Amino acid sequence: MMQRHIVHLMRNDSIGTLFASLIEPRAALLYSETMITTIIFDFFDVIRTDPAKALFKQYGIERTGKYSQLFHRLDLGEIEQNEFFTSLSKLSGVDEIKIIEHYADTYVANDNLLILIEDLKKNYKIGLLSNSPRTYLRDILKKHDLEKLFDEVVISSEINLLKPSPEAFNYTLKKLNSSPAETIFIDDTVQNVEAAQKLGIGGIHFKSVTQLKTELVNQGVYVN
């Protein structure tokens, strides 16, 4: 917690760098012209595997055209999960029961990333911003005790806003009481990262935990 107190002091005091180095040397690593206080993560294919991508790969389906429109409606909250499963089955020809079972059975978490997030939470506000159906993601977070990792969870279908819209990012920043300049956003989709960067948010295109740690340090984040 000492680092968090130092961060707030440095944000308002020009001698913050010197103070941090005297009180706790590693805290000096946190100092930059604008302090990073907030880190926002995407969920699917960052924290855990994306069941839709795995399903489409299995059956050779491209997420374009009517498939893309269907996911858009789901993630915006225009339709519920059950209706989505029925429509996806009709559209693809894949048995609905198989689709439901696939979504239920494809939970593979990135355990190394979860450990990193838990460590980062000691010194930073942690947010989650996901394009996702509300019940599906909420159930995953609850079942695997992941809610405790995040100060705020923002799900597209609950707010009727999708990444990469500026409104989705601004809504999340407001919930976290953070400015773009003090925030980093992490996503596996380049378009979402670029959209965040246009708003002045630091962006990282997620590829691996090792790569993420390096880029976080490069952007002024203390990584244990």
Image (cartoon, rainbow, N blue to C red):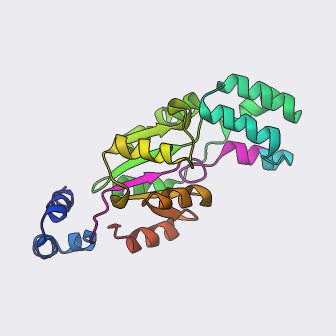
Residue 189 appears in the figure = no
Instruction: State which quadrant residue 78 falls in.
Output: top right
- The magenta stretch is 33-55
Residue at 71% across, 43% down: 52
Position of residue 134 in the picture relative to residue 81 (left or right): left
Residue 114 inside the magenta-drawn segment:
no
Position of residue 8 in the picture relative to residue 107 (left or right): left
User: Residue 27 appears at what percent x and percent y?
Assistant: 21, 69
User: Residue 206 appears at what percent x and percent y?
Assistant: 55, 62
Residue 39 appears in the figure = yes
Residue at 31% across, 55% down: 124
Q: Is residue 184 above or below residue 211?
A: above
Q: Main secondary structure of the magenta part?
A: loop
Residue at 42% across, 61% down: 200
Camera-nearest residue between 110 and 90: 90
Residue at 50% across, 32% down: 159
Quarter of the figure that contains the C terminus: bottom left
Quarter of the figure that contains the N terminus: bottom left
User: Residue 173 appears at what percent x and percent y?
Assistant: 38, 47
